[in-house]
């Protein structure tokens, strides 16, 4: 799914380090260590990006990752601090199942997936990471799922229904449940 480029200048972005990995390269004189950092950035209101940086020092790797994440920002729809509908994100062997939750549920997600939700501004969600537990793949699977989210109003326009009809259908469903 192709999205438009988001300019990070006017946004108040928060960044969060998800994972730092020390990598050793064996050379003639011994081992050379370098670091890779996985960072997610977001504005807390439905905009999120991910970046990976590599350098010989940890702060430099984090700085590079933040720069890359700002270049890869994407927007997704939010509804009352949760996702608009259930979605499954996939990347490699990882799957992340994301279910919207009622207000007050909180963030029920683990590790790298939780970090993405925190910076993206999602307060109520139930998510489960399946398959592998590689943080790089988990973050990419989460972003894949968030990129597939659809705005309910946009879907109603595509289906040819007015906005009022959608509200009437929800009211009728609630009456049946009661």
Image (tube, rainbow, N blue to C red):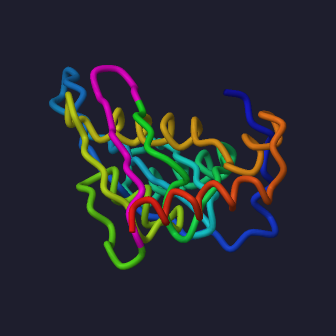
Relative to the observer, which residue lies in front, 40 or 106? 106
The image shows residue 1 at horizontal and vertical percentages of 67, 27
Q: Which residues are magenta?
A: 90-102
The picture quadrant where one finds residue 96 is top left
Q: How many marks?
A: 0
From this view, report whether residue 70 is shown above or below residue 5: below
Q: Indicate whether residue 129 is drawn in magenta.
A: no
119 on left or right of 79: left
The image shows residue 149 at horizontal and vertical percentages of 58, 42
In which quadrant of the rendered image does the C terminus lie?
bottom left
Relative to the observer, which residue lies in front, 43 or 170? 170
Identify the residue at horizontal 23%, vertical 55% (top origin): 110
From this view, report whether residue 113 is shown above or below residue 172: above
80 on left or right of 136: right
The image shows residue 138 at horizontal and vertical percentages of 33, 38
Q: Main secondary structure of the magenta part?
A: strand
Identify the residue at horizontal 29%, vertical 28% (top origin): 94
From this view, report whether residue 45 is shown above or below residue 34: below
The image shows residue 100 at horizontal and vertical percentages of 42, 56
Identify the residue at horizontal 20%, vertical 29% (top origin): 132
Q: Indicate whether residue 96 is drawn in magenta.
A: yes
43 on left or right of 90: right
Identify the residue at horizontal 49%, vertical 65% (top origin): 175
């Amino acid at each position: 799914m192709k999205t438009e480029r988001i300019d990070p200048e006017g946004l108040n972005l928060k960044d969060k380090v998800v994972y730092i990995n020390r990598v050793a390269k064996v050379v003639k004189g011994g081992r050379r260590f370098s670091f890779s950092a996985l960072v997610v950035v977001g504005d807390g209101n439905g905009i999120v990006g991910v970046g990976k940086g590599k350098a010989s020092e940890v702060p430099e790797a984090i700085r590079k990752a933040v720069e890359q994440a700002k270049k890869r920002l994407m927007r997704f729809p939010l509804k009352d601090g949760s996702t608009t509908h259930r979605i499954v994100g996939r990347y490699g062997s990882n799957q992340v199942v994301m279910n919207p939750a009622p207000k007050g549920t909180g963030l029920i997600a683990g590790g790298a997936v939780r970090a993405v939700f925190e910076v993206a501004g999602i307060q109520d969600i139930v998510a489960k990471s399946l398959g592998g537990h590689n943080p790089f793949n988990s973050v990419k699977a989460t972003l894949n799922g968030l990129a597939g989210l659809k705005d309910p109003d946009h879907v109603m326009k595509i289906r040819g229904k007015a906005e009022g009809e959608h509200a009437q259908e929800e009211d009728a469903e609630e009456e049946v449940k009661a």
